[in-house]
Structures are given as C-alpha cells and as structure tokens.
Image (cartoon, rainbow, N blue to C red):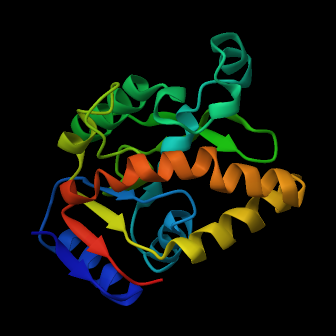
Amino acid sequence: MPIIIKTIEEALKRLKTLQENNEQRIIIGIVGKPGAGKSTLTSYLLSNLVEEKAVLVPMDGYHLSNKLLEEYGKADRKGAYDTFDSRGYSELLKRIKLDLDSDIYFPIFHREIEESIVAEGVVLKDCKLVLTEGNYLLLDKHGWQDVKSFLTESWYIQIEDELRWERLMARSIKYGRSPEIAHKWTHGSDEINAQVVETTKDKADVVLTFQ
C-alpha cells in the first residue's frame, strides 16, 4: 500500500526526512495526469530547500521534435507516451543515479515554442537531490519500464478531474490556443493521456491527495 500524504507541508517534511536518512543522491519521481499540479509541487519543494543542492529534471525535455512528430504522423497526439524519447530519458536517470563524478546535462522543454533546448539544464556532480516530474514515469511499456528502478521514491498526485480540466484550459489559452481548441485538447488528446497515467497509480510509493 502506498503512503498517503494530505498536505504540501507533509510532502516537504518527507523529502527532508529522506535527505537526513540517506547519504546517496536522492531522485524523487513526481507523477500525475496532465494538469495535476506537478510543476506547482516541484516549485514549492525547491523554493523551500534553498540551502540544499537540488535540481528539477522534467521529463518533458524528451518530447520528440515537432518535425519528427509531423514525419511520424503523430503531431495531433503530442504528449502521448509514444511521442517522447523514453529510452533517452531513462538513460539520463540511470546516469544521474550512478554517475556521481560528472556534471550531467539535460534538455528543457519550452511551451512558448513547443520545443526542447538541448543541454540547457545541468545536474552538478555535488547535487544531492533531484526531482523529476512527468506523466509516464511509472508506465511499464514503450521504453518507460526501467524508469522506476532509478527512483528513490515515486510520488503520484491525485486530483479531481474538474480542477485539472480547468487548469489545462487556462494553460492552453495562455500559450495561444483559442478557447475552442483548448477545450478540444483538454478533453481529447490530454484526456486520453490522463487515462493512461491513471493505470499507473498503483505502482507509486506515495500518493499525494492535496489539491
């Protein structure tokens, strides 16, 4: 049975406890449906660990390029589990876990251009805590299946769908989609992806139930 955490303060406390009891590099995987609040949680955790050497490594950096998605006929499914370089992301986490003697660079995705910039982020060799967040960290197919083995713990954010849809709509409109297109993505492609993420919940070590 997973551990249940009901407040964001409890999540921070658990993270600090893990740090106190572990001399190795800690990698926390934060999982949730689109719009669940993964980025909000990681921002809160990092801002309250100001004295620690910590970094966020988002899964989204491994989106396939728009050019490749067009070539593969998957442009209208961007964000689905098979539209990422899943093995590249898995290998990155393996390096982060095992290579403590090198600075490790990683790509970062930018919503304003819908593309990733390579080697924009770095896990410094003395970094003790890595947060990584994304939809498919607990998926057991299509190259994602090894990811969980590289995590110290996996955390799943559970949230009401109505609030999640509201957030997704607002985010889509913020980045230039019309309300009609935003609604189509929120209840179409994003919702299909959300159903896939839901199937992985039982694999999480911790379930976060705050909104």
User: Relative to 192, is 72 on the left or the right?
Assistant: right
Q: Nearest the camera: 49 or 158?
A: 158
How far across and down, in percent of the image, does residue 23 sit? 15, 60
Q: As displayed, is residue 48 above or below residue 67?
A: below
Q: Looking at this rendering, what residue extends furthest in the top direction?
A: 71
Residue at 32% from the left image edge and 80% from the top image edge: 11
Q: Is residue 150 above or below residue 31?
A: above
Residue 177 visible (yes or no):
yes
**Left or right: where 166 falls relative to 175:** left
Residue 153's image quarter? Answer: bottom left
In this rendering, the count of numbered labels is: 0
Residue 134 visible to an observer of this rendering: no
Q: Residue drawn 27% across and 77% down? A: 16
Camera-side residue of 125 and 31: 31
Which quadrant of the figure has residue 159? Answer: bottom left
User: Which percent across, then down, holds residue 72?
Assistant: 63, 13
**Would residue 199 appear left or right of 35 to someone viewing this image?**
left
Q: Is residue 209 left or right of residue 67?
A: left
User: At which x and y percent is residue 195?
Assistant: 43, 51
Which quarter of the figure is the N terminus placed in? bottom left
Give the image location of residue 165, x and y in percent: 63, 67
| Residue at image location 78% in from the left, 55% down from the top | 182
Q: Residue at x 67, y 56 (%)?
A: 186
